Amino acid sequence: MTVALDKDPAGAPGAAAMAGAARPSRRGLLQGGWSRSLGLVVALAVLALVVGCSLALGARPVSFGRVWDSLIAARPTDPDAARDWSVVRSLRVPRTVLGVLVGGALGMAGTLIQGLTRNPLADPGILGVQAGAALAVVIGINSLRVQDPISFVWFGFAGAAVAGAVVYALGSLGRGGASPVKLALAGAAMSALLVALTQAVLLSDQATLNEYRFWAVGSLAGREDDVVRAVAPFIVVGALFGLNRGRSLNGLALGDDVARGLGLGLVWARISTALAIILLCGAAVAGAGPIVFVGLVIPHLARSICGPDYRWILAWSLVLAPSLLLGADTVGRLIARPGEVQVGIMTAVIGTPVFIALIRRRTLAEL
């Protein structure tokens, strides 16, 4: 693994090493392939612990032993144990699986977007995918009276995909093709337009607003197995595709001229990265609503740990983001029992101090 990630097949220094020399990016806390790999194993263990807490904690606490029994055994005859079995299997397992999928998708999408646009403050909303998903859901509620969460998934994904494709097409117009600046500007303009259209529909129909606001806050609550099955294929394909974009992002980080000189096909690199972003963002937003801050803070946290090599940043983001999302969701369930604070609110509350701490350690130029 060390050779594959730190050097190219010919044994020459990889693009990440040249990227680190070309721009003032600080090295991460972990140096060398073995230490990064061992650290990733520890991060996976932390994620497993967070998953266990997500299954056990909530309005009705369930012991870890009974959680395990609920996962591997049939429904028990004891009434109290049967209630715990039902809570774990019917409510918390779909919620936790969706949290892992959505968290991983948002973390990786944020890394891909920051690498594609070379913008350290970019997040999944910058390409208009969140605004596109929101408008599509609003249209579905207003025009077709859609109320089923599984229908929100398909409307949201379709809207995100269309918005992302339009933004990329607009950013590709003119000389130079889809440059980072043009993509960011096209995404900002499209997001403003889509948000305005969404607000116009919501203000004209109170019933649509009432139905939409529960989805728009960003939540894992109330999502059942059918929602997980609907978004999982898109997230898995997008994650596998995104993991292979690390070398391309390392080349793009050097600038277009240097990347072209190294033999990188800029058009394919940007189109393939944008496709992975659309798959990941579209499915995540469709499944759980527009959850903020995960796609912004996780890439910076991963970079501070493993350094500037995007091949490692993508892998770390895929593991760290679900831990943040599920941790925030679990805390939201505990602090307002028997109710809960939606995860879209909790990620902002938890993510803000983390991001401020990272910013204090590094300047924006270093990020």
Image (cartoon, helix red, strand yellow):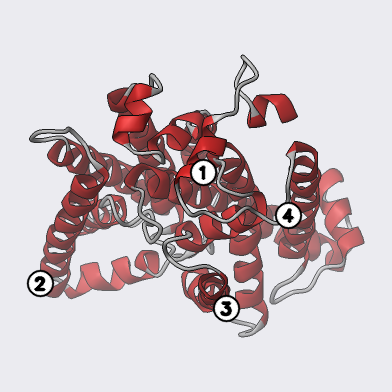
Which is more toward the observer, 113 or 158? 113
Position of residue 62 measured from the top left corner of the image (x, y, whole percent):
82, 68
The answer for how far apart the CA atoms under marks 2 and 1 are is 55 Å
Res. 125 image quadrant: bottom left
The answer for how far apart the CA atoms under marks 1 and 4 are is 33 Å
Q: Secondary structure at mark 2?
A: helix
Give the mark nearer the N terminus: 3 vs 2: 2
| Residue drawn where x is 58% and y is 62% of the image | 325
Provide the residue designation for mark 3. 340
Decide: is 149 above or below 278: below
Q: Is residue 216 left or right of residue 111?
A: left
Provide the residue designation for mark 2. 204
Q: Secondary structure at mark 3?
A: loop
Give the mark nearer the N terminus: 4 vs 3: 4
Q: Mark 1 or 4, which is nearer the eye?
A: 1
Do the residues bearing badges 3 and 1 touch, measured as CB atoms within 8 Å? Answer: no
Q: Mark 4 or 3, which is nearer the eye?
A: 4
Give the mark nearer the N terminus: 2 vs 1: 1
Do the residues bearing badges 4 and 2 touch, measured as CB atoms within 8 Å? Answer: no
Q: Mark 3 or 1, which is nearer the eye?
A: 1
Q: Label for residue 47? A: 4
Position of residue 56 measured from the top left corner of the image (x, y, whole percent):
78, 65
Q: Secondary structure at mark 1?
A: helix
Do the residues bearing badges 4 and 3 touch, measured as CB atoms within 8 Å? Answer: no
Q: Is residue 339 left or right of residue 282?
A: right
Q: Residues within 10 Å of mark 3 (few under 14, many from 20)?
A: some
- Residue 318 showing in the rendered view: yes
- Residue 226 showing in the rendered view: no
Q: Label for residue 21? A: 1
Position of residue 150 measured from the top left corner of the image (x, y, whole percent):
41, 47
Which quarter of the rendering shows the N terminus?
top right
